Image: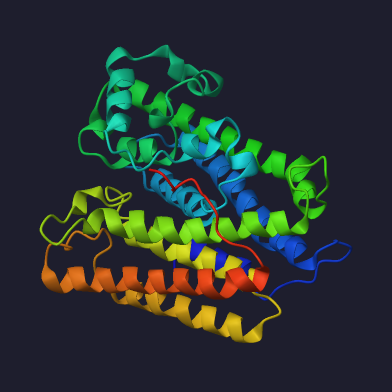
Amino acid sequence: MRPLILSLALLCAPVMAVADTPNPKIGDIVSNHILPRFEMLADTTAGLASVAQQECAPTSEGLRDAYGSAFDAWVSASHLRFGPTETDDRAFALAFWPDSRGATPKVLSSLISAQDPIAETAEGYAQVSIAGRGFYAMEFLLYDDALMKAGPPAYHCQLLQTMSADMAATSQNILTDWQDRFADEMLNPSAEGQYRSDEEVLQELFKSLSAGLQFTSETRLGRPLGTFEHPRPTRAEARRSARSSLHVTLSLLSLRDLAARLAEGDDDLMAHLQSRFKKPLEELNELDDPVFSSVGAPQTRLKVEVIQQSVDAIRDLVRDGLGPTLGVAAGFNALDGD
């Protein structure tokens, strides 16, 4: 079991009681689902930046392990696309994908070719196009056959060090905003605040769950599936680092935890949700294709399609079962209109 999957198991432990909050369900989700994930993201990106200062060769096992742990932490928090993650486009600065126009390798190639001095400091690097920042950009530097060898080794090292420091600063800024202000705004809605009522907070959380499931189905699974006539395995997420299937697993584990906390108090609904989530997680565990490279082969394609259908079955239950229980609907999200 990967270290972060083990950590997620701890994060998804039985619900802890939250005292002195106006709405215990919201208090539980903020304290036991949201804050721990952003704490983990800040810790692991800081660890990545520290390792990069000591080991900056792209083939360094220590650097790649630190990168993997930090990326795991981001995926487990990536459905929480509101508030501090959206400030200054922080989520995109950490995770610019899908990149349908291939902007990331172009930005990196340009920086390396010019040995651009913007890579000297994290503060300067924050001005680089978001396509050249974050986890997907670093994946090219660590795993792409061409870019991991491009340019002078000293500049490549500096680029990795500065990029990781930028990621750590962005992650810490997200956490600080949650701790200093945004958690309190969710716990204490008011006419003057970000949220005017508990219902608006629950709507936001429900939307995050719904959009997270949609992204996993339509993008993490749908992009490599393409069509039967034209499968697109090279469009799989993080395929260079062989993380495509892992991201689906990590996302589902985290979304399962959020769904269970939102359904707390309705034992039948919780049981149905657990059953629905169990199916694609088991199917992923049995799939021997970490990057969905075999979606062109009928048998493997069918297995991935079945996983996608299982995720869509969760979406149906969330929409038709959990939404009415909470008295909310998914509404619009960042995936609509793309």
Asked whether residue 118 appears in the rendered view, the answer is yes
Report if residue 58 is visible in the image. Answer: no
Q: Along the horizontal axis of the image, is 158 left or right of 82?
A: left
Quarter in which the C terminus is drawn? top left
Q: x%, y% of residue 67?
A: 44, 46
What residue do we see at 37% from left, 35% from top? 137
Residue 183 in the image: above or below residue 134: below
Quick one: quadrant of the N terminus? bottom left
Residue 89 on image: x %, y %: 53, 33
Q: Position of residue 311 (x, y in %)?
A: 40, 69
Q: Position of residue 114 (x, y in %)?
A: 31, 13
Residue 262 location, quadrant: bottom right
Q: Choose top left, top right, bottom left or bottom right for residue 269.
A: bottom right
Instruction: Out of 205 and 53, give the one closest to the viewer.
Output: 205
267 relative to 146, above or below = below
* Residue shown at 25% from the left, 39% from the top: 144
Left or right for 187, reference 243: right
* Residue at x 60%, y 61% (from the top left corner): 206
* Residue at the extreme right of the image, as rendered: 20
Question: Please, is residue 326 above or below residue 48 in the view?
Answer: below
* Identity of the residue drawn at 18% across and 63% down: 295
Closer to the camera, 155 or 329?
Answer: 329
